[in-house]
Image: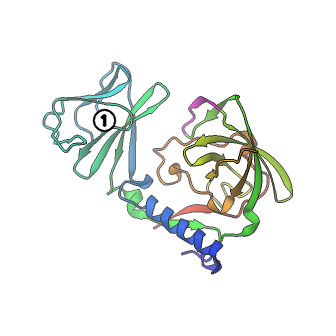
Amino acid sequence: MTTQQSTTTGDQFGKRWAAWHDSRERAVRAPYGPAALVATNWLADGIELELDTVAGAWTITDGAVVGTGLASSGYTDASGEAVGDRVALTAGEELRDGERILRAFARDDQRALRVLDPGAPGRAALLGIDSYAPGHDYVVSATFRPSTEQVDVLQADGYVSRKDLGGKLDFTLGGAQFSIDADHSEAGLQVVFADATSGDESYRFRFLTVPAPEADGSTTIDFNRAYLPPCAFSDQFVCPTPAADNRLTVPVRAGERNAITA
């Protein structure tokens, strides 16, 4: 636990935050957590490629990630059965290679084969997450305004995707008013933001989940629950980066800051 974390108060607010922080550290340090991703191998439609540390040859066929020449690979499928010479994986489907996982990944019409390895050096070096001490000042009321707008999203590897914008969150923080992009998610609203600490005190951007708004659009943003994107633990992820409106001009000294590594 860092010095800043050790200042956590003993009230229920602090205890709830500490429980959340502990669960986050367990998740990122898990055997197949984000630090275990060692490769995102992009594939070409109709062109067979041989990949480092992966048996066989791989391509895209009818939108699936297809591997051939796997009869002697020792790979097993989701049921634990040895694979034959050819496999076709849709997004999210996996093969096992001992402790490693080979997982199909999709982004728009692109496809990749990802490799997750519990023995990854990055996972072995990950000690935890440095975070700011929680504070009530970073819990603010907000209003959500739905939108039908489409926006471009720049991802960490330079790729630009097009998506429907969920809407805007209006709130005041540090004496300044903001209106930031938010997307719908199973947990409520999802936000990608940067602030005046980003790239200096904290990682270059962070994620935040906001409770689903009430019928009148009201909700609450708790910046103490700001968390690091997966690409903070492995550069093989292709995380979305903040839109211009989501680059806050005030410092947000709340939530997760950086990965702690040996």
Measured as percent of width and height from the top left, residue 98 is found at 22, 50
Tell me: 72 left or right of 10. Answer: left
Quarter of the image that includes the N terminus = bottom right
SS label for mark 1: loop
Q: Is residue 215 magenta?
A: no
Picture residue at 58% right of the left edge, 57% below the top: 227
Tag 1: residue type?
Answer: Leu
The percent position of residue 75, horizontal first and vertical second, equals 20, 41
Magenta region, main secondary structure:
strand
Q: Which residue is mark 1?
A: 51
Residue sitting nearer the eye, 58 or 215: 215
With respect to residue 134, does 170 lie above or below? Answer: above
Q: Position of residue 260 (x, y in %)?
A: 51, 65
Residue at horizontal 25%, vertical 45%? 96
Which residues make up the magenta segment? 157-164
- Horizontal side of 161 relative to 91 (left or right) equals right
Q: Nearer the viewer, residue 78 or 62?
A: 78
Compared to residue 74, the image places residue 28 above or below, namely: below
Q: Quadrant of residue 39?
A: top left
